[in-house]
Image: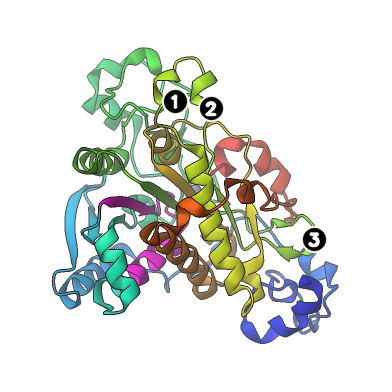
Amino acid sequence: MRLSQRPFLTGLAGLSSAALIFTATPATAAAPDDGVSVTAAKQCSETPRELPINQFTDHRELGVELARIERVSAGKVDVEQIGRSNRGREVWSARVGTGRKAVLITSEIHGNEKTGTDAILQLLDWVGTSDSAKAKRWRSELTIVAIPKMNPDGAELDRRGNDMTWQEVVAQFPQLSTSQPAWNYYTRPQQGDDYATRPGFDVNRDYHPDLNYLPRPQDFPGSSAQTGWYITPESRIVRDVYRGLKAEFGKVDTYVDLHHQGACYVMPDDPDEFVTMSISGKFVDNPATTPGYEKYAKDYDLDYSKRLNVAVNTALQAAANNRPVFGNITLYPQDINLPGTGLGSFALNGSGAVLFEVRGQTQTLGQKYRAVLTQGVYIGLDGMLSAIASGQVHRLNPADYDRIPPRGPNIGTPGADDAAADARIVAY
Ligand SMILES: [Zn+2]
């Protein structure tokens, strides 16, 4: 099916193989997309490089755009500064709707993963201004709280980690003065970024399912299979919003975190077709059978997370009728156990959890497919939010989640396997 459709993709500036040439010679670049161009696919590269990103929304533009949306929504979208990053940049939330189901959406916890922020802005603009029956239903059934660009220091540096030293952590938590730095503290080059000069943390390993946890020296340096500590201001900001919503609504119905993954994953049944997006609803081992996590078992609801992901996938597969790249959706690896991630910690608190992993971070794709990939995020969010608002999500079959194909291999060269060997870098 995908093979027969590919010739029609060429006019769409989509993600077909021939469009994916990063270091091509002129002869290769001019080659037509013949549908079996394995040569072109093989040129996909995971090697970091400097690429333009100016079309993405930066921190200053985000503030301007949120203020504009708040204004034109005539009070329907409420924008609030909810804290400051470690380097003092504002972090904002935008809240819309008065419904009893709370949905929290975050983007750019990794600052080199930017489509989520643009998709959130489009979504806020629409739900805050539309008079359609659908928008009214969203606003009456849902309370959507978005925290776009939650790691603005990393975003301005266009890198994964935040901008914070271990010394700054210890200054704030003196009880850690004799502890080893956290395992997710970056001090060496990664993804082409110089953390030796400017260290930072992977904020998406700094969460803890105990929303009142305070850092204890015996919990360091920790590991990927253990919980985080809320040592970064960015994770604390999101935690505080989540905790507030939980107090207000009893539970946070859904938490969505918007990410990007490697650029060169292909579909499991077709090495010429790149994965447009991987999705997931599973981030931790079953708490009922995991020592120390039993207390979270009564709230944890993997089936609900699966239903939410089915809604995302269904919307994208429908959109693939017009634009086949939206059909290239796979499951993110299901064998991970990362309780220190936002999704892991909040899933343990009873939220349905959804991960978006859009193709390619800025060091490999730059802004090349910004519009189409942002549209993919928008379509997925739109389908999911509509399903929650209508109640349809509860009629979806969790078993359909398990039928979403797994991610195929990463065909990137060189060094993709080397990078993949370090799960700390590539795991979402
Ligand atoms: Zn990420």
Q: Is residue 146 above or below residue 196?
A: below
Q: Which mark is residue 271?
A: 3
Q: CA distance from mark 3 to mark 1?
A: 39 Å
Q: CA distance from mark 3 to mark 2?
A: 33 Å
Q: Identify the element where label 2 is drawn.
A: loop
Residues at marks 2 and 1 touching, judged by CB atoms closer than 8 Å: yes
The residue drawn where x is 43% and y is 61% is 116
The answer to whether mark 3 is within 8 Å of ligand 1 is no
Question: Which residue is under mark 1?
Answer: 297
Is disc 3 surrounded by few (<14), some (14 to 19) or many (20+) residues within 10 Å? many
Nearer to me, 346 or 373: 346
Q: CA distance from mark 2 to mark 1?
A: 8 Å
Is tag 2's residue or tag 1's residue first in the polypeptide sequence?
Answer: 2
The residue drawn where x is 52% and y is 50% is 307
Horizontal arrangement in the rendering, residue 41 relative to residue 183 (left or right): right
The answer to whether mark 2 is within 8 Å of ligand 1 is no
Is tag 3's residue or tag 1's residue first in the polypeptide sequence?
Answer: 3
Question: Which residue is under mark 2?
Answer: 286
Note whether residue 199 is visible.
no
Q: Residue 143, how many percent across, how many down?
A: 26, 56
Residue that extends furthest to the front in the rendered view of this protein: 395
Q: Which mark is residue 58?
A: none
- Kind of residue sitting beneath label 1: Ala
Q: Residue 317, how many percent across, how many down?
A: 61, 67
Query: What is the magenta range?
Result: 100-124
- 105 part of magenta stretch: yes
Q: Identify the element where label 1 is drawn.
A: loop
